[in-house]
Image (cartoon, rainbow, N blue to C red):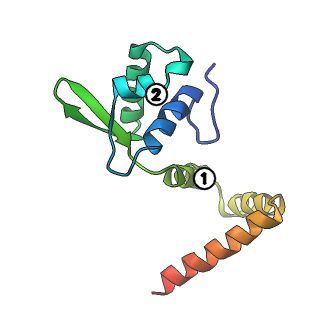
C-alpha cells in the first residue's frame, strides 16, 4: 500500500515533487538529475523514471524532450496544488455539507491560522473589487 501524503501524492511522488519545487521557476531536471538528488533513498533509475512519467500523466509535471531524454518541471506550485486538492475535496459536497466542513475546519484552526485566513480573505476581497 502506497502511503498518501496530505497533497494526495504518494511518499515517493512527494519526494520527487519536492525536488522539482526547489527549482527556480524556469528550471528543469532530467530523470538522472532527480535520481541523483534522491540518492539517500537508494532507488533504481527506472523507478524515478516511472514516477516522473506517472506525474506527467497526472498533469502534475511538465516535460520536454532534451535529445533522447526528458526534462521535467513542476506544472504548478506547491500552493497551487494544495489549493486544488482542497477545492476538489469540497467541490462534490452539497452546500450544507461544504459549509459544515469549512466551519469544522475553522473551529479547529489555531489563532495564528485564523489571522492568516482573515488577512487572506481581505486580500481576495480586494482583488475581486477591482
Q: Is residue 4 left or right of residue 26?
A: right
**Within 10 angstroms of label 1, few (less than 14), some, or many (20 or more) residues?**
some
- Relative to 7, is 37 above or below? above
- Judged from the image, the secondary structure of the residue bearing numbered disc 1 is helix
**Within 10 angstroms of label 2, few (less than 14), some, or many (20 or more) residues?**
few
- Relative to 86, is 42 above or below? above
| Residue 86 location (% of width, % of height) | 60, 52
Residue located 41% across and 36% down the image:
58
Residue hosting label 1: 86
| Residue 23 location (% of width, % of height) | 41, 44
| Residue 70 location (% of width, % of height) | 26, 29
- Relative to 32, is 58 above or below? below
Could you say which is closer to the camera, residue 130 or residue 73? 73
Name which quarter of the figure residue 123 lies in.
bottom right
What quarter of the picture does the N terminus occupy?
top right
Residue hosting label 2: 37
First of labels 2, 1 by sequence position: 2
Q: How many callouts does the rendering have? A: 2
Tag 2 and tag 1, C-beta contact below 8 Å: no
Closer to the eye: label 2 or 1 = 2
Residue located 82% across and 66% down the image:
111
Name which quarter of the figure residue 117 lies in.
bottom right
Distance in Å between CA atoms under marks 2 and 1: 29 Å
Indicate which disc residue 130 carries.
none
Name which quarter of the figure residue 52 lies in.
top left
Amino acid at each position: 500500500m502506497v502511503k498518501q501524503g496530505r497533497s494526495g501524492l504518494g511518499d515517493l511522488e512527494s519526494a520527487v515533487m519536492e525536488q522539482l519545487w526547489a527549482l527556480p521557476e524556469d528550471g528543469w531536471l532530467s530523470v538522472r538529475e532527480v535520481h541523483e538528488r534522491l540518492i539517500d533513498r537508494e532507488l533504481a533509475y527506472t523507478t524515478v523514471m516511472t514516477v516522473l512519467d506517472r506525474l506527467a500523466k497526472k498533469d502534475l509535471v511538465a516535460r520536454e524532450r532534451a535529445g533522447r531524454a526528458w526534462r521535467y518541471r513542476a506544472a504548478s506550485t506547491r500552493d497551487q496544488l494544495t489549493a486544488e486538492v482542497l477545492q476538489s475535496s469540497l467541490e462534490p459536497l452539497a452546500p450544507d455539507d461544504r459549509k459544515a466542513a469549512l466551519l469544522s475546519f475553522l473551529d479547529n484552526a489555531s489563532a495564528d491560522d485564523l489571522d492568516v485566513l482573515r488577512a487572506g480573505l481581505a486580500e481576495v476581497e480586494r482583488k475581486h473589487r477591482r
